[in-house]
Image: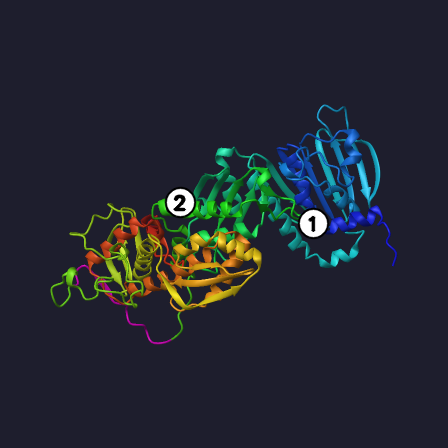
Amino acid sequence: MPIRQLSETLIDQIAAGEVVERPASVVKELVENSLDAGATRIEITTAGGGKSLIRIADDGCGIPLSELPLAVRRHCTSKMEAGLQGIETLGFRGEALPSIGSVARLSLRSRARGAEGAHEILVHGGRQEGPRPAPLSAGTVIEVRDLFHAVPARLKFLKSDRAESAAITEVVRRIAIAFPGVRFELSGEDRATQIFEAVEEAHALRRIAGIVGDSFADNAFALDAVREGVHLSGHAGLPNFHRGTAQHQYLYVNGRPVRDRMLLSALRGAYADAMPRDRHAVCVLFLAIDPRDVDVNVHPAKADVRFRDPGLVRGLIVGTIRAELARLELRGSTEGASGLMARFRPGGGTAPEPGPAPRPAPFAGFDERPHEPYEIERSPSRPLDAGWSAPRPSFGGLQPSARAELVADPAPPERAEFPLGAARAQIGKAFIVAETGDSLVLIDQHAAHERLVYEALKEAIHARPLPSQMLLIPDVVDLTEAEVERLCAEAETLQRFGLHLERFGSGAVMVRETPALLGEVDAGALVREIADELTETGSGAGLKDRVDHVAATMACHGSVRAGRRLQGAEMNALLRQMERVPASATCNHGRPTFIELKLADIERLFGRR
């Protein structure tokens, strides 16, 4: 079979298969061009889910008449002055317009600033017409009609008009977050008009809340950190404010929306022991990094990036979020209270099945007294005093700081003295009712104490290198040479967690000791798991996660159980400890430990407001 040169039209159509995957891809490329042109107002109009019509109008700098033919020619761009090593614009390949023109009917109308008039150029099936004079006061207008009419086979892979329209909306929303100073208007016969008004940079959270949701501002905290020239900013949601998918995670690198696996993995690591494993944090994060230290030229869609030092970026994200969580005042998600209020309203709950009336749950208040005089120092149920409910760790126990005891207050506090107020009663031997100056707080006693014990355990465990247990017969693990190099580079860090390994010839490591806290463990599987994680994220956090999981199990067994009656002093002691540990808003499994109901909302339920 002879080798032959492909036609320019076919070359453009092949390129279009990578650049133009669906109508949303067209919108993304054209809006990014508008932003690169300095536009402050961008109007997006669609029809038929973008398959029939996509129109982008902006007030940018425009394109001079002499450059119009180059604008629709492959690999012609105004954005590569610094080469691939210093890409500072959203677009740079010079493939978008010719690729779109090869599979659709494209018209480009533009008037450069200072020009006497506007001109238009048409591209149909890769063939150019013009330029010719056209009416336009300023900026650029691009129309894309009959997308994929030149390659009808691609149409069958598109979804419904509604689905394609929703994908376009999501693209515009993600871009609008990164450019709060630009006004975006999204309209068309296939959608309701949406307008994102321009706001000042200082009020960027207003733009974010309008896109992510109004509740985000009330359930997020600000981030601002710099490490070795990499700047992280934005907002991250509280651990008890989460969603079922990662679609509410908005990540940007130098203003470019990305969906990078390493960044998503870093977010999971930051919330590892504060959120259920099947839930995802809500966040808007911006990374500013030297263009020479990040490669955005990985894929034509430009959604994937590669960092020169992924470990630095991952450490910055994980460390900053965890540090901010540790510094936060104790905050509960407003969604917990909203959901509880909804259950109280008529029709808000599920009707009970017919049957005998349930017995009322026990209600324990301060007025109840035990049969014998109560002394907290000698209470047989006092948690973590005489010993662990679970077996003690084999490495000789923990320091006293790892114990989370309920130390009694001498007298019940006034309700307004503390964030969680004063304990007033216990319901069902499982929940504490507390009162503050303007709210009622419901606390899950087991979940709350489990988090306190877990945090104390982690502090004790990670305060010094973990003890290890020597293998009777060292385990040799076969790996690739690259994996061996990565493991050996992290050997010192792994030793802190009790894993001792060394190079064993070519393409193998020898494991001599494993963490004692893990007990009997498959050394080969553990090392391969860490090697895979180092390959993907540049961090071997998997071993630490295993150690933390053991600590979480110990905390679960060693904390106050549901079904145990607490005295008033014990309940108030638990509340005071929660206030000193910001992470105690959720348990180790990510469930909320308390829900706060404002008295104003309770009054509204009873029609008093």
Residue range (magenta): 355-368
Residue at 28% in and 61% down? 397
Residue 134 place in picture, x, y as percent: 79, 32
* Location of residue 94 with respect to 259 vertically, above or below: above
607 magenta-colored: no
Looking at the picture, how far across and down is residue 133, in whole percent?
81, 30
Residue 175 at what x, y percent from top left? 59, 42
Name above or below for residue 430 compared with residue 162. Answer: below
Q: Residues within 10 Å of mark 1 (few under 14, many from 20)?
A: many
Q: CA distance from mark 2 to mark 1?
A: 39 Å
Horizontal relation, residue 130 to residue 178: left or right: right
Q: Main secondary structure of the magenta part?
A: loop
The residue carrying mark 2 is 324
- Counting labels gives 2
Residue extending farthest bottom: 355
Q: Image check: 166 left or right of 478?
A: right
Mark 2 and 1 residues: CB-CB less than 8 Å, in contact?
no
